[in-house]
Image: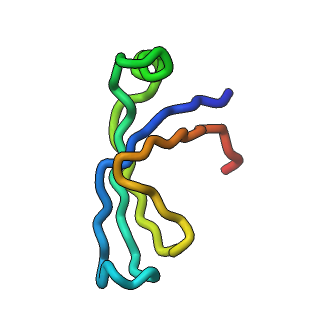
């Protein structure tokens, strides 16, 4: 079974020089809790609660503050 969640990027913390694209970053995301649109109301009811914190070293993996992202959880082999 796959569970799809909708998250919003709330902040980014740079672990060094923020002008250097290779600087590691930490992104903080939270699940959507908003009933202003039909889609967001649906995710508000179904999305797990909590927060997601991602430490990223890859300069190509970027998240924009204020942007929404889908996160799919699928079972994986151990």
Q: Up-down: is 70 above or below 39?
A: below
- Residue 23 place in picture, x, y as percent: 39, 80
Quadrant hosting residue 20:
bottom left
Q: Quadrant of the N terminus?
A: top right
| Up/down of 51 relative to 5, above or below | below
Q: Quadrant of residue 19?
A: bottom left
The residue depicted at 46 percent of the width and 68 percent of the height is: 56
Residue with the most extreme front position: 37
Q: Quadrant of residue 25?
A: bottom left
Q: Which residue corresponds to the image point at 48% horizontal and 63% vertical from the top-left?
A: 62
Residue 3 in the image, given as x and y percentages of width and height: 59, 29
Q: Is residue 43 left or right of residue 12?
A: right
Looking at the picture, does residue 65 appear above or below residue 21?
above
Residue 8 lies, in percent from the top left, at 39, 42
Query: Total number of numbered labels?
Result: 0
Looking at the image, residue 76 sits to the left or right of residue 7; the answer is right
Q: Position of residue 28 (x, y in %)?
A: 33, 52
| Residue under the point 51% across and 32% down | 5
* Residue located 46% across and 82% down the image: 22
Q: Which colour scheme appears in the figure?
A: rainbow
């Amino acid at each position: 079974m796959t569970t799809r969640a909708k998250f919003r990027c709330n902040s980014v913390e740079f672990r060094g020089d923020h002008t250097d694209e290779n600087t590691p970053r930490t992104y903080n995301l939270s699940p959507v809790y908003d009933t202003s649109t039909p889609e967001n109301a649906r995710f508000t009811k179904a999305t797990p609660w909590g927060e997601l914190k991602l430490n990223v070293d890859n300069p190509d993996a970027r998240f924009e503050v204020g942007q929404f992202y889908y996160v799919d959880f699928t079972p994986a082999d151990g």
